[in-house]
Image: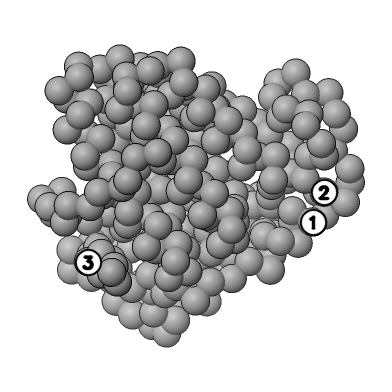
Amino acid sequence: MTKTPPEEPAAIRSIPGPAPAPWSLRKQDWAYQQLRERILTGRLAPGERLSQERLANELGISRGPLRDALSRLAAEMLVVDRPHQKWTVAEVSVADARDIYNGRAALESMLAAAAAQSPSDVRAARCTELEVLLERQRTATSLGDVAEVRLWDRRFHDGIYALAGMPASLGALDHLRAKSDRYISLYLSDTSRAHTSADEHADILDALSAGNPERSGALTRTHVLGGLTLLTGTIGDQPATFSDSASVPSDARTSLGAAARNHRTTQSRPAHAPDDGEVPPRAVRPRK
């Protein structure tokens, strides 16, 4: 049976020429969304110098809202503001990826384990919702829609971690994930990796449904660090953890930067979550 692609979520489209911000958004928010998506998809490459005049003209806004947007991006370490120099897109590096991903692994595995200990009725209802999100991620992967893959990937993990009831830890994780979005986008742009990610999500969902905190946490940690291993070019079975003493060859740093610079997508809109009131169609994934 042919699967019907899920309904597309509401999204703000990125227009290359001058375009005013939608009435529903402040100009600085519009500029932030547009520039962030360009950085995540590689349209603005690591190390690229940013001309405020050009960007303001392209987005159809003044420099005030643009500077506000750039400041927000700087807080997420996506752009850099150096004294007496132009803003530049932040570089990517193996060291940065290791720092961010190890922090994510610690927090995400803890939250996933806590989620598996939530009340069984609440957990069961959430697992039904997560089945739908996973099916949508698989559909987006099959269609090669990287922006949609990122969207459903994020919503899947958010749905799990919300069960943990640990808002402070979730807030710390959100800060790290904002910094890792470029790496996630780069990782998921490879179709085979995106399929692997969905398969790993299915295993995590099984552990969550079974109420197994040890397995849920362990699978989540492996899921996060597996992405790091592929991104950094770590060789062999050496785990990419704090205790990892294996040196990363210099060409791994070069390949990571080159991959980020060459990473492009045909997607014209940034990932944007559907309205909270949206009720997705029911989808069922066969159990293993």
Disc 3 to disc 2, C-alpha distance = 39 Å
Q: Is residue 24 left or right of residue 244?
A: left
Q: Nearer the viewer, residue 9 or 81?
A: 9
Which quadrant of the figure contains the N terminus? bottom left
Residue contact between numbered discs 1 and 2, judged by CB atoms under 8 Å: yes
Disc 1 to disc 2, C-alpha distance = 5 Å
Mark 1, secondary structure of its residue: helix
Kindly identify the residue that appears in the image at 38 percent across and 55 percent down. 137
Res. 255 mark: 1
Q: Nearer the viewer, residue 44 or 222?
A: 222
Residue contact between numbered discs 3 and 2, judged by CB atoms under 8 Å: no
Under mark 1, the amino acid is Ser
Under mark 2, the amino acid is Ala
Which of the two discs, 3 and 2, sits closer to the camera? 3
Sort mark 1 into few (<14), some (14-19) or many (20+) by Cα contacts within 10 Å. some
Which of the two discs, 3 and 1, sits closer to the camera? 3
Locate residue 212, reporting x and y percent: 38, 18
Res. 7 mark: 3
Kindly identify the residue that appears in the image at 34 percent across and 40 percent down. 287
When asked about the image quadrant of residue 260, the answer is bottom right
Kindly identify the residue that appears in the image at 33 percent across and 73 percent down. 13
Mark 3, secondary structure of its residue: loop
Res. 163 mark: none
Which quadrant of the figure contains the C terminus? top left
Disc 3 to disc 1, C-alpha distance = 36 Å
Locate residue 147, reporting x and y percent: 43, 62
Locate residue 157, reporting x and y percent: 38, 38
- Report whether residue 48 is seen: no
- In this rendering, the answer to whether 98 lies above or below 4 is above
Res. 252 mark: 2
